[in-house]
C-alpha cells in the first residue's frame, strides 16, 4: 500500500467515525425530546442502546454547545437553549415554505387546511389556509388542540412509543364528544392503527359535526409538525379518498420544498372504521 493509500484510508476512517458520532448525538437528542423532567445518563443509554460512558462523553460535548443542559449531579439531562433558537429559525423558514402549498391544497379540495406544531401536550395551529365555502371549518392561528382526539394530534402521538404517550397523556382522558376515546388503552389501540395506515382521523371526536384527516411532516430536525384538513361531517366520507390523496401530495410538496424529508413514509392501508 502506498503512502497516499494509507492517508486516504486514515481520512476515510476519521470521516466514518465523525458520521457515527453525529448519528449517536442525534439519537440522544431525539431521546430527550418531550422529556420535560430530563433523563439520567443511564436512561439515555438504555433508550439509544449505547454504553453509558459513550453517552456521557457525547452529552458532555452537547452541553458545551448548550444543545443540552445537565443537572448538578449529572442527572436530569434536558434539551438546551441552543436547540430552541435553532427550532425558532427552522419554524420561521418552514412556515414561509409551507404556506403556498397549504393554499394550493385548499384550492384543490375546497376545504380549510391547518399546519400545527407539537408543543407541550397539545398541537398549536401555526399556519392556515381558509376555505371560502359557506359551510366550512374556521380555524385560528395560535389555537391549541388536544392530541388524543384530533387528527393532527393523533398523527403526532403515533410517532411516539406507547410508553412516551402514556407519560404525556396520562391515564385520565376527558371525553369532549360521544365519539372521544374514553381510556388510554383505547387511545393506544387507535395509535397502532394510525401507524399502520400512515394517517390519522378525527371522526367527530373533538367537535360534533366536524371530522378531519391528518399526517405529520417527516422533518429531519426541529419542531414536529402535522398537516390536517378539517371538514364538516356531512361531506367527509364522500370526499375522503380525494382528501387523503391530496393531503399526502401536499406533504410531499412541502418536504421537497424544504429539502429536509428523512423519515420513511408509512403506507396507508384501508380507511377509518
Image (cartoon, helix red, strand yellow):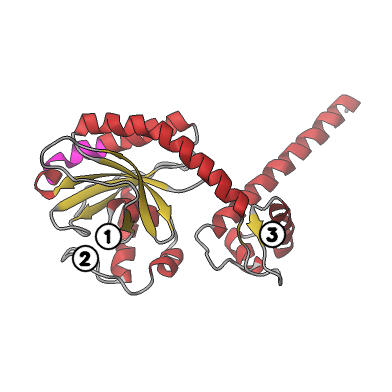
How far is disc 2 from disc 1 in space, using C-alphas?
8 Å
Density class for disc 3 (Cα within 10 Å; few <14, some 14-19, many ≥20) is: many
Q: Secondary structure at mark 2?
A: loop
Q: Are marks 3 and 2 in contact (CB under 8 Å)?
A: no
- Determine if the magenta segment contains residue 239: yes
How far is disc 3 from disc 2 in space, using C-alphas?
42 Å
Would you say residue 220 is visible in this rendering? no
Q: Which disc number belongs to residue 35?
A: none
Q: Nearer the viewer, residue 256 or 162?
A: 256
- Dividing the picture into quarters, in which one does residue 14 lie? top right
| Residue depicted at x 69% and y 53% | 62
Q: Secondary structure at mark 1?
A: loop
Density class for disc 2 (Cα within 10 Å; few <14, some 14-19, many ≥20) is: some
The answer to whether 171 is drawn above or below residue 192 in the figure is below
Q: Position of residue 156 (x, y in %)?
A: 38, 53
User: Over which residues does the magenta segment extend?
Assistant: 237-245
Question: Is 264 displayed left or right of 183 in the figure?
Answer: right
- Give the residue pinned by disc 3: 55
Task: Give the main secondary structure, helix, strand or loop, of the magenta stretch.
Answer: helix
Q: Secondary structure at mark 3?
A: helix
Q: Position of residue 27 (x, y in %)?
A: 59, 52
Mark 2 and mark 1 lie on one chain; the one further toward the N terminus is 1
- Give the residue pinned by disc 2: 176
- Give the residue pinned by disc 1: 149
Mark 3 and mark 2 lie on one chain; the one further toward the N terminus is 3
Q: Nearer the viewer, mark 3 or mark 2?
A: 2
| Residue depicted at x 85% and y 30% | 7
Amino acid at each position: 500500500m502506498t503512502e497516499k493509500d494509507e492517508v486516504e484510508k486514515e481520512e476515510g476512517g476519521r470521516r466514518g467515525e465523525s458520521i457515527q458520532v453525529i448519528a449517536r448525538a442525534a439519537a440522544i437528542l431525539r431521546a430527550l425530546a418531550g422529556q420535560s423532567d430530563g433523563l439520567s445518563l443511564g436512561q439515555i443509554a438504555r433508550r439509544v442502546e449505547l454504553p453509558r460512558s459513550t453517552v456521557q462523553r457525547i452529552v458532555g460535548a452537547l452541553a458545551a454547545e448548550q444543545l443540552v443542559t445537565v443537572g448538578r449531579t449529572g442527572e436530569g439531562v434536558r434539551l438546551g437553549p441552543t436547540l430552541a433558537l435553532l427550532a425558532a429559525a427552522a419554524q420561521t423558514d418552514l412556515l414561509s415554505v409551507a404556506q403556498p402549498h397549504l393554499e394550493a391544497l385548499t384550492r384543490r379540495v375546497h376545504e380549510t387546511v391547518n399546519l400545527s406544531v407539537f408543543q407541550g401536550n397539545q398541537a398549536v395551529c401555526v399556519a392556515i389556509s381558509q376555505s371560502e365555502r359557506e359551510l366550512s371549518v374556521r380555524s385560528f392561528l395560535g389555537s391549541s388542540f388536544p392530541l388524543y382526539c384530533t387528527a393532527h394530534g393523533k398523527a403526532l402521538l403515533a410517532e411516539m412509543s406507547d410508553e412516551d404517550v402514556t407519560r404525556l397523556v396520562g391515564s385520565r382522558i376527558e371525553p369532549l364528544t360521544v365519539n372521544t376515546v374514553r381510556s388510554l388503552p383505547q387511545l393506544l389501540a387507535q395509535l397502532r392503527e394510525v401507524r399502520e395506515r400512515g394517517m390519522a382521523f378525527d371522526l367527530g371526536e373533538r367537535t360534533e359535526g366536524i371530522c378531519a384527516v391528518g399526517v405529520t411532516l417527516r422533518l429531519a430536525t426541529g419542531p414536529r409538525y402535522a398537516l390536517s384538513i378539517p371538514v364538516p361531517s356531512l361531506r367527509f366520507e364522500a370526499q375522503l379518498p380525494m382528501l387523503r390523496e391530496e393531503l399526502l401530495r401536499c406533504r410531499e410538496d412541502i418536504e421537497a420544498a424544504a429539502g429536509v424529508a428523512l423519515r420513511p413514509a408509512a403506507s396507508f392501508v384501508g380507511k377509518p372504521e
